[in-house]
Image (cartoon, rainbow, N blue to C red):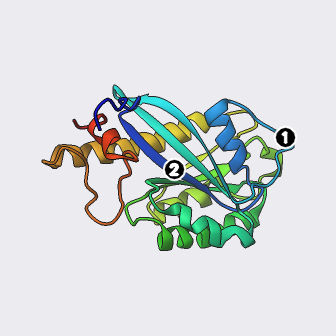
């Protein structure tokens, strides 16, 4: 379409936050996108998202972070939002062992509903609660390695490792996309199987984005 404005980013990556209710997903989202933390944050109803634009290797990456409700009754709703996601942060609370036990179920749901090539990071949140720790770092590291996930512990409260977690997963997604771009001969990225890479939401954005 003539005269359409150029996109203000090279890549658009959709990343979902999943895990039990109360593990701090909403505060991880607000800390990364707005540098805010709310002690009185309510449980997310349904789905909400926020965006932040960062630079990775000279490219402008727009991260669209989706916060999915952890309550059981919303799981059927949120499963639809895995579609198009290229990354996922699987979050548990280091002070609540049940949230860690449920990571296996969340991982299965992710494998069932998301693309098989999605980049997944296991996140042990609330690392500031050292005196209440109930999940050993080593155990989570071993689980992550066994399931080919990256792993990090964060605190949305004091902001430790939140930036690093998002930067790491977005950089890994960017590395995968860039590799595919170099290998492909088309003018824009085409997923090899299913909806692997969601670079932009329209042809105009693709044309003015990463590979034109």
What residue is at 45 percent from the left and 42 percent from the top? 170
- Quadrant where the N terminus sits is top left
What residue is at 49 percent from the left and 31 percent from the top? 53
**Is residue 132 placed above or below 29 in the rendered structure?**
below
What residue is at 83 percent from the left and 46 percent from the top? 131
Q: Residue furthest left?
A: 185
The residue that disc 2 covers is 15
What is the number of the mark on residue 52?
none
**Is residue 6 placed above or below 75 in the rendered structure?**
above
State left or right for residue 86 relative to residue 207.
right
Mark 1 residue element = loop
**Is residue 49 placed above or below 119 in the rendered structure?**
above
Question: Hey, which quadrant is residue 160 in on the image?
Answer: top right
Residue 124: where, in percent of width, then height?
65, 51
Towards the viewer: 72 or 143:
72
- Quadrant where the C terminus sits is top left
> Can residue 161 be seen by looking at this rendering?
no
């Amino acid at each position: 379409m003539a005269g359409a404005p150029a996109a203000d980013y090279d890549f658009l990556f959709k990343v979902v936050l999943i895990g039990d209710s109360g593990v701090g997903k909403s505060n991880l989202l607000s800390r990364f996108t707005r540098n805010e933390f709310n002690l009185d944050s309510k449980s997310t109803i349904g789905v909400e998202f926020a965006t932040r634009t960062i630079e990775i290797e000279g490219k402008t990456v727009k991260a669209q972070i989706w916060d999915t409700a952890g309550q059981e009754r919303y799981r059927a709703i949120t499963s639809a939002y895995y579609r198009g996601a290229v990354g996922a942060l699987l979050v548990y609370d280091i002070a609540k062992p049940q949230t860690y036990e449920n990571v296996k179920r969340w991982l299965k749901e992710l494998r069932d509903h998301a693309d098989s090539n999605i980049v997944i990071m296991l996140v042990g949140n609330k690392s500031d609660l050292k005196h209440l720790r109930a999940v050993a770092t080593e155990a989570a590291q071993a689980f992550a390695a066994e399931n080919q996930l990256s792993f990090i512990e964060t605190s949305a409260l004091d902001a430790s490792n939140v930036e690093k977690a998002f930067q790491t997963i977005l950089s890994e997604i960017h590395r995968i996309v860039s590799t595919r771009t170099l290998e492909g001969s088309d003018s824009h990225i085409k997923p090899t199987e299913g909806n692997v890479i969601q670079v932009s939401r329209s042809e105009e954005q693709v044309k003015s984005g990463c590979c034109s």
